[in-house]
Image (cartoon, helix red, strand yellow):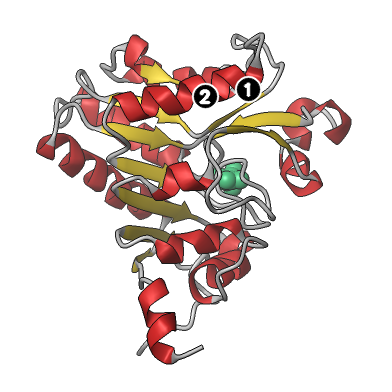
Amino acid sequence: MSDKHVLDRRSIPTIQIHDTPDEVASAAAEQVQRQLKRRADSVFALPTGQTPLSLYAELARRCRDGELSFSEARTFNLDEFVHIPPDSPLSFESYMVHHLFSHIDIDLTKARLPNGNAPDLHAECREYERAIAATGGIDLAIVGIGRNGHLAFNEPGTSFTSRTHVVQLSPTSREAFASEFGGIDRVPKLGITVGLGTILEARRIILLALGPDKAAIIARALQGPITVDVPATILQQHPNVLVILDRSAASRLHLAS
Ligand code: PGA
């Protein structure tokens, strides 16, 4: 393979490295605020997990202080468990209400998550894709990364062209939820996730990662070979990715001095 070919298929993401998680949150909030200023009815794809918690707290603060408004924004969450009641504290829907939606001025009819309790899950996946497309597409997707390189619930081996689909959660992903659910055996085995193809179609993507546990996978995702074994390597094929890290998550990257 010629060097030229390699250069053609890889984009170098912009990487910001901050001293503290709070600075990561503020840098990411700044990007959201700019996006809303550009277009009040922007379409966001949103993650759950530990990583975005301080971002959501910062967005709530900025909304409360009148620095930004989500009143016209539309949001699509990246994933949800299958067969966890939406009002269970363990659902991603509850997470979003608790950590973000109840603190901002968003119109809740415009804030969607995949419905993991739909009678026909495959029809729900098609409808979710249709709803995203009907908005004109995602302006800004904010994603975290799993220690196995998953993006949303797209586990290693997922096709780069996948659309919203039902997924069998990997042991690594289920393990990450074991303490919340009171044991890995109680963690759902299935989820719904937007696909890697869906994420790659977003106009801009922000990848957030914090802490030393993410250092190895961040280095593989951003500087390793592009492979379905590490779903996040797909980000190297997107022309507009901003990676926002704290120092420990960035510690294994090879950075030009
Ligand atoms: P975390 O999860 O933010 O809780 O580390 C990220 C992910 O698994 O995508």
Dividing the picture into quadrants, the one containing residue 138 is top left
Q: Are marks 1 and 2 in contact (CB under 8 Å)?
A: yes
Q: Residue at x 30, y 59 (%)?
A: 240
User: Mark 2 vs ligand 1: CB under 8 Å?
Assistant: no
Which is nearer the eye, 160 or 107?
160
- Residue flagged by tag 1: what amino acid is it? His
On screen, residue 148 above or below 114: below
Q: Can residue 231 be seen here?
A: yes
Mark 2 closeness class: few <14, some 14–19, many ≥20 residues within 10 Å: few
Q: Residue at x 62, y 41 (%)?
A: 153
207 with respect to 194 (left or right): left
Q: Residue at x 35, y 11 (%)?
A: 108
Mark 1 closeness class: few <14, some 14–19, many ≥20 residues within 10 Å: some
144 with respect to 91 (left or right): left
251 with respect to 26 (left or right): right
* Horizontal and vertical percent position of residue 23: 34, 54
- Residue flagged by tag 2: what amino acid is it? Arg
Q: Which quarter of the frame holds ligand 1? A: top right
Secondary structure at badge 2 equals helix
Dividing the picture into quadrants, the one containing residue 117 is top right
Q: Residue at x 88, y 31 (%)?
A: 185
Q: Which mark is residue 126?
A: 2
Q: Can residue 113 be seen here?
A: no
* Horizontal and vertical percent position of residue 142: 40, 44
Which is nearer the eye, 164 or 249?
164
Q: On the image, numbered disc 1 is attached to which residue?
A: 122
Dividing the picture into quadrants, the one containing residue 46 is top left
Locate the C terminus by quadrant: bottom left
